[in-house]
Amino acid sequence: MTSRPSKIRWTAEEYQRYLLTGEEPTTEPDPGLPKRGRTEKHVRAGRCHRVTVRRPDVGVTFDSLTEERRYDWLLAQPDVRHVDVHPVVSLPGGIRYRSDFLVYGPREDDTALLGAVPLWLEDVKGSAKLPTEFRRIRKLFDSHHPRAPLRVVIWDSGEKTWKEVPA
């Protein structure tokens, strides 16, 4: 069994077979599967950016394709040990907020692969123009939560890089 599955789209049956036997499916994706969770109806309507993306190899459903790409990018970073997807944090006034990622890194005194500490909470957005409700929650988070500040990132398609949105 390999340590990390390949970057192909698996069906639920293929993933179960991988867990039981360790054999990976063929590298050819099934032509009958919609590409990355999109259906023809969504593609024709021009709403592909809002379609959720299921990843059975991770066991998570991402809110968008951009969020899935950020997850893969975070895991590829050498200083990131683990990434929690959709952690829920409590804020004053009984507000519960579900961010996109909680990123863990190595302990300062730890050189082994075991042990990680939470570094930051992160949210992935489609554009730098943030909704009013989100700006309120971000301000509340930054002023009261111990993991402040909340990082908000967007994908800049012109420069092909991730950019942090200032508070």
Image (tube, grey):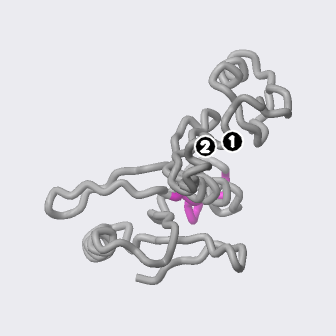
Judge whether residue 110 is colored magenta.
Answer: yes
Rendered residue at 69%/16% (across/down)? 20
> Residue 7, relative to residue 100: is it above or below?
above
Q: Which residue is the site of mark 2?
A: 38
Q: Is mark 1 on a helix, strand or loop?
A: helix
- Give the magenta-colored segment's residue range: 103-112
In this rendered view, identify the residue nearer to me: 120 or 133. Answer: 133
Going by the image, does 20 lie left or right of 90?
right
Q: Which residue lies furthest to the right in this view?
A: 27
Decide if residue 121 is in sight here: yes
In this rendered view, identify the residue nearer to me: 7 or 29. Answer: 29
Q: Which residue is the site of mark 1?
A: 35
**Quarter-wise, where is residue 27 in the image?**
top right
> Residue 165, relative to residue 113: is it above or below?
below
Going by the image, does 61 lie left or right of 14?
left
Q: Is the magenta stretch mostly helix, strand or loop?
A: loop
Whole-percent x, y for residue 125 in the image: 49, 66
Mark 1 residue type = Lys
